[in-house]
Image (cartoon, helix red, strand yellow):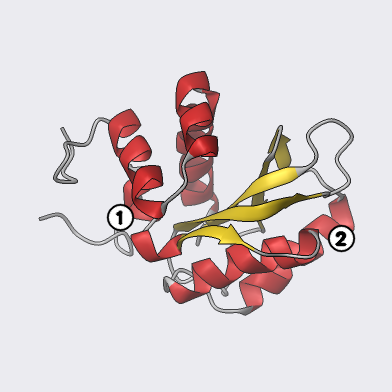
Amino acid sequence: MGQGIESEAPNNLLELLPADAVRMWVTVSDWRTAVRAAGEALTSSGATSIGYTDEMIACVEEFGPYIVIAPGIALAHARPSSSVHRAGLSWVRLGSPVEFGHESNDPVSLVIGLAAPDDSSHMTALSTLAELLSDDAARSALMEATFPGRVRDIIRAHSGADPDGKDA
């Protein structure tokens, strides 16, 4: 078995997204509580401290809804900081979509949280996630997934990992 993600750059989204960081049908009242839900999932998985959630919200307050990267999808993140313990992702499917204020990609029904301890792992995670989301079939399947195991199965199939979770 390989080393944990704390000691090497993650090369697989499944390494970044533990099962307990996938939340489905989360009820939120606005974009801030949606980002907070993604941050809470990152914190509970051990990837970040709670301060990182405030950093993600502050980025949207400062720069606007740039995190809404595709129709219905927001990628909540902040700059690498001491609040990040290790690279990680969270996956929050909202019970009802919310507006982030994006001109063309609102409303959002999926918030993906991204945490990275340094610029290199930040870029690696972003490019791996972008590759997944640029696959129309995978993106559609992910948007339609109704339970956490299905999300991970779709990611596993796209990444080339075998059904037991090991890389092919």
- Considering only vertical position in the picture, is 15 above or below 48? above
- Considering only vertical position in the picture, is 125 above or below 2? above
Q: Nearer the viewer, residue 158 or 85?
A: 158
- Considering only vertical position in the picture, is 32 above or below 82? above
Q: Quadrant of the C terminus?
A: top left
Task: List the residue tagged with mark 2.
Answer: 61
Give the residue type at disc 2.
Answer: Glu
Residue 70 locus on image (x, y percent): 69, 32
First in residue order: circle 2 vs circle 1: 1
The residue that appears at 63% across and 54% down in the rendered structure is 94
Question: Is residue 81 in view from this perspective?
Answer: no
Q: Residues within 10 Å of mark 1 (few under 14, many from 20)?
A: few
The residue that appears at 73% across and 67% down in the rendered structure is 33
Question: Is residue 120 in view from this perspective?
Answer: yes
Give the residue type at disc 1.
Answer: Glu
Q: Quadrant of residue 34?
A: bottom right
Instruction: Label 2, secondary structure: give it.
Output: helix
In the displayed structure image, the side of residue 53 where residue 163 appears, left or right: left
The residue that appears at 32% across and 52% down in the rendered structure is 15
In the displayed structure image, the side of residue 157 where residue 40 appears, left or right: right
Residue 136 locus on image (x, y percent): 52, 20
Task: List the residue tagged with mark 1.
Answer: 8
In 3D space, how far apart are the residues under numbered discs 2 and 1 (Cα atoms)? 32 Å
Residue 158 locus on image (x, y percent): 34, 29
Q: Quadrant of the N terminus?
A: bottom left
Instruction: Label 1, secondary structure: give it.
Output: loop
Name the mark nearer the viewer: 2 or 1: 2
